[in-house]
Image: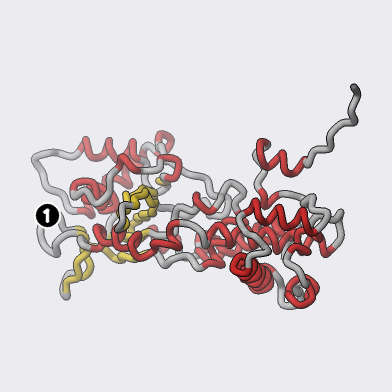
Amino acid sequence: MNVPPVQFDADALETMIGGQTFLDVRRLSIQNREQGKAFFKAYGYDVDNADDLTKLWAYHRKAATYIQDELLTREERVPTRLSDPNELGDIVNLLIMASTTGGELQRWSSAILKVMHVFVHLENDLFAQFSAEIQDQILGPIQGHIHEDSVIGTTLGPALGPQSIVLKKFEVKPFKTTASSVTKLLAKRELVAFRLLDKIGVRIVTKYLYDVFRVLKYFLDHNIVSFAHNIPDQSNNTLYPLNLFFETMENLSRDAEYTPEQIDKFLRERLADHAERARYHEKINSFSSHEFRFIKFITRRLVHIDGGLNFFYPYEVQIVDYETYLKNITGPASHDLYKQRQVEKARERILGDKK
């Protein structure tokens, strides 16, 4: 018996098995309220449940506010027809409007839904539920080795002795604001919320280039980190090539003593003489300037929650020498320009244009 060909939702299938993300879906295929309710229920929210409906409206408000405050110019406005719950009437109407073909309401309703989607995933992860325990168990072991001396200043390790490393800065990375996290997820196609790996971390600025590597050794020797839990594809070393570092160390006499300044001099001389052999390890970030230099790794700690819940949680460690740090915070490598490039990409992805 012959049957007519079945119609397939191309966007849905591309998202399921074609590598497309939900944020890149061109339009939905919701034709009526019943289909919309079913879509939301599969997504995780029952619009007939008062608590779930309240949550959906809260995400709607956050999404509309984010778009208005972060992505639009002063002259632009999210259409009131979509941003005002009284005018929208039913949250399911967003799905129906996002399913129409073309038009401004379709574009804006799709944008709001996609930003809502990011908020949903950000606010329903382990960090949102156990932030205090995660911070204590990740930052505590590191901060326990940071010391403040009235004369020497900040050190990793005791203020005096061969293991002491004088630091120009030790910073716990400020937690990303929700807006910052949303922007990052919108800007990077490969990211989803559970792969937002730098919610928590530290930044260490050493006085000398050589001390950057001493910090790494200190972390390993004192079991502050376990290199077994490192996430390899997140490591970044654009500061100094490991192959030339090891060569420099091997050429130092084991019977002599050197100052950090002397070893820095040897390191820079070897790099100048053998630049063509330098092997950096760069994780490409389309929003970072090529002039931004640092060492970064993302590792994980097994977090224990009272009641028997255990899970690994990632955190980031950045290390850089002071001379490079000063270069990083100015010019094209500055953080402000980095964020500006992210915002522009987020807008282009969600609204289809640039500021």
Q: Count the marks.
A: 1
Q: Residue at x 45, y 63 (%)?
A: 128
The residue that mark 1 highlights is 162
Q: In the image, 155: left or right of 31?
A: left
x and y percent of residue 192 in the render?
Answer: 56, 50
The answer to whether residue 121 is above or below residue 189 is below
The residue closer to the viewer here, 307 or 163, is: 307
Q: In the image, 103: left or right of 253?
A: right
Crowd rating for badge 1 (residues with CA inside 10 Å; few <14, some 14–19, many 20+): few
x and y percent of residue 179 in the render?
Answer: 56, 67
Where is the N terminus found, in terms of image quarters?
top right
Q: Residue at x 30, y 42 (%)?
A: 227
Q: In the image, 299: left or right of 292?
A: left
Where is the C terminus found, in terms of image quarters?
bottom right
Residue 340 visible to the viewer: yes
The answer to whether residue 181 is above or below residue 251 is below
Q: Residue at x 40, y 52 (%)?
A: 294
Judging from the image, the colouring scheme is secondary structure
**Kind of residue at disc 1:** Pro
Mark 1: which secondary structure?
loop
Q: Residue at x 10, y 44 (%)?
A: 256
x and y percent of residue 171 in the render?
Answer: 34, 66
x and y percent of residue 36 in the render?
Answer: 75, 56
Q: Residue 160's image quarter?
A: bottom left
Residue 70 visible to the viewer: no
Q: In the image, 204: left or right of 343?
A: left
The residue closer to the viewer here, 57 or 259, is: 57
